[in-house]
Image: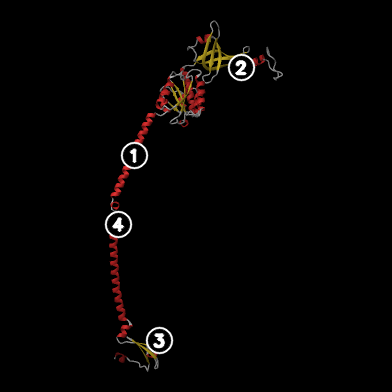
Amino acid sequence: MSGAEPDRANSPEQPWPVRSVAIKVMQWIDRLGSIWVEGQITQINIRPGTRTAFLVLRDPSADMSLSVTCDPELLRRATVPLQEGSRVVVYGKLTYFTGRGTLSLRVTEIRPVGVGELLVRIERLKALLGAEGLFDPRLKRPIPFLPKTVGLITGRASAAERDVLTVAKTRWPAVHFEIRNVAVQGASAVPQILSALAELNRDPTVEVIVLARGGGSVEDLLPFSDEALCRAIVAATTPIVSAIGHEPDAPLCDLVADVRAATPTDAAKRIVPDAAAEAAAVRELRARAAAALRGWVDREARTLTQLRSRPVLAHPLREIDRRAEEVERLRTAARRSAQHLIRTESTAAQHLREKLTAVGPAATMARGYAVVQLVMGKERHVVRSIEEAPAGSQLRIRVADGAITAAALGAKALGPQTERN
C-alpha cells in the first residue's frame, strides 16, 4: 500500500500510525460512492478568483451539518436563486482529505426543492402518520381547567409571544409562564424546538405546553410539519396546544397536538379561563341557587299551610268527638240489638219450658197419676206390669207432692172393658 504501513495486528506495542488510519478512513468513505443528499443551505461562501464554492448543508430535523464543495457555476446556473435557508437535493461524492483530516461532500448537481414538492412531501408524511394512528382523537389528552404553570415555546420578542402573554394575563392574572425562546424558522428551528419541548415536558410543574408562531409562507412553516417534531409531540406526556400561523395554515403539528388553536390569541383563550366570565358564572349560579332555595321554601310553606288548614289538623279534637259519638251510637245499637236478642231468646226459652212442663211427669202426676217403684234394697225400679210386683213386694208410690211407701197385697189384670171404665 503506497504511503501506508501494511496491515498488521494492532496493540499498544504495535500501534497504527496516523497515516494508516487516515488512509483506511479514506478507503472506507470512498466505498460509499456517489449519493443524493437532502438538506438546507445555512452558509454559502464563494471566494473571488477561485474555482470552488464552499457551502454548509444542515439537516432540518437535527443539529448536524456537512461541508459541501462545488463549482461556483452550479450555484449561478440554478433555476431558482439559492441562498441561505434554501432546501436542496445535491448529488456528489464524499471525500476525506487525509492531510487535514476533514470530510467534505463534492457535489456535481444541485436541485432546489420547490414549494410544490415540499407540499407533496408533507402530504406523504401526513398519510404515513395518519396510517400509524397518530391523529386518532383517542390519543388527545385533556387540558387542565386552570393550569398553574404554562410552558410557552415561541420566537424571541415575537408577536405570538406578546399575544399569548397579554391575553392569558388579562383573562387569568395568576397564571405563570415558563417561556422558551427558539428559532421558529430556518435550519435550526426543529432542533431548538425539540430541545425546548423535551425540557418543558420533563418539568413536573408545567401542566400544558403551547407551541406558538405567527403566520408565514409555506417555507417558513416547514419546521412545524417535521416528522421528528410530530412524533415528539405525540410522545410527550404533557398536553400540547398548537397555535401555528393563522386560520388557513395547517402544519402537521396541528393534527398531532392535543388541541389546535387557530391563532396564538385563540390558544391563550383555550388554556386559561376568563376570570371575569367565571366570576359572572359564579354569581349567576349563586343567584339561581338562592332562587331555587327560596322557591323550595315557598313551596314547603304553602304545603304546611295547606296541611294546617285541613280539618284534621285545624281542629284535631273535633274528629275525635265525632268518632266518639259514632262509637257511642254503635255501642247503643249493639246494646239494643243484644237486649232484643236476649228478650227473644228468653221468650223462646219460656215457651220451651212451658211445653216441657206440660208434657213432663210432674204435670201428669198433678193430674192424679203416680209413679210406682219396686224397692229392692237400695235399688228402685219402675213397675210397668203386675208381674213385676208380686204380693208382698215393697213399693214406693210417688205422687205430685211426695212419695208413699206401701206393700203389694195382690194383683188383678184388667180387661179392655174394665180399662175403659
Question: Which comes before the other along the chain, label 2 or label 3?
Answer: 2
* Pointers 4 and 1 in contact (C-beta within 8 Å): no
Disc 3 on helix, strand or loop?
A: strand
Question: Which comes before the other along the chain, label 4 or label 1?
Answer: 1
Disc 1 on helix, strand or loop?
A: helix
Q: Residue furthest top?
A: 49
The residue that disc 3 covers is 380
Mark nearer the viewer, 2 or 4: 4
The residue that disc 4 covers is 320
Estimate the x, y position of residue 149 in percent, counting from the top left. 46, 28
Disc 4 on helix, strand or loop?
A: helix
Residue 182 placement, left or right of 342: right
* Distance in Å between CA atoms under marks 3 and 4: 70 Å
* Distance in Å between CA atoms under marks 1 and 3: 104 Å
The residue that disc 2 covers is 29
The residue that disc 1 covers is 292
Mark nearer the viewer, 3 or 4: 4
* Pointers 2 and 4 in contact (C-beta within 8 Å): no
Estimate the x, y position of residue 296 in percent, counting from the top left. 33, 42
Q: Is residue 315 above or below residue 386?
A: above
Q: Residue furthest bottom?
A: 409
* Pointers 2 and 3 in contact (C-beta within 8 Å): no
Q: Is residue 263 visible?
A: no
Packing grade of label 4 (10 A; few <14, some 14-19, many >=20) is few
* Distance in Å between CA atoms under marks 2 and 4: 117 Å
Q: How is the image coloured?
A: secondary structure
